[in-house]
Image (spheres, rainbow, N blue to C red):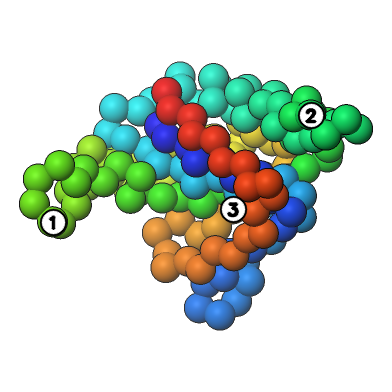
Amino acid sequence: MKLVIQRVKSANVTVSGEVVSEINRGFMILIGVSENDNEQVIEWLAKKCSELRIFPDENDLMNLSIKDVGGEVLLISQFTLYANCHKGRRPSFVEAAKPQKAEKLYLAFAKALQQKGVKAKLGRFGEDMKVALINDGPVTIILEK
């Protein structure tokens, strides 16, 4: 599983011109699920995300977690994180999980975040989404397990 975590001041996702989810301060997370992933990786990643100290404290040091600042997560499924571009000019996505498995793990990850005390809002799995955000910092972290 791959996560691209962006610290944001705000973010939203639109499908067919309709805003389906939006957050203020927090993380916009792109999540890619591979064929080799299972539910064991979810617990580790949810714990890491909920405790990652990348928000500034009163001394402007990255010392606070998303829970410390009362932030939210906008979680966006992103199979293209598993693009293999080594050969040719067209990416291969054979490492990405099939949609049924990917959606199950995507939803399980959102639930795990909620259980850790982090409010998670979702995009629409498998849809053509338009994501807008105001990156804060910018701070972008890549987590993989």
Check if mark 1's residue and mark 2's residue have beta carbons within 8 Å: no
Measured as percent of width and height from the top left, residue 14 is found at 57, 70
Q: Residue furthest left?
A: 88
Q: Secondary structure at mark 1?
A: loop
Q: Quadrant of the C terminus?
A: top left
Camera-side mark, 2 or 3: 2
Measured as percent of width and height from the top left, residue 63 is found at 78, 25
Taking the spot 74% from the left edge, 29% from the top edge, the residue there is: 62
Camera-side mark, 1 or 3: 1
Mark 3 closeness class: few <14, some 14–19, many ≥20 residues within 10 Å: many
Taking the spot 68% from the left edge, 46% from the top edge, the residue there is: 137
Q: Is residue 35 visible?
A: yes
Measured as percent of width and height from the top left, residue 70 is found at 83, 40
Q: What whole-number distance in Å separates the C-alpha atoms at marks 1 and 2? A: 42 Å
Mark 1 is on which residue type? Answer: Arg
The tag earlier along the polypeptide, 1 or 3, is 1
As displayed, is residue 33 above or below residue 47?
below
Q: What whole-number distance in Å separates the C-alpha atoms at marks 1 and 3? A: 31 Å
Q: Which residue is mark 3?
A: 122
**Which numbered dot is residue 79?**
none
Q: Which residue is mark 2?
A: 61
Mark 2 is on which residue type? Answer: Leu
As displayed, is residue 12 above or below residue 91?
below
Q: Which residue is mark 1?
A: 89
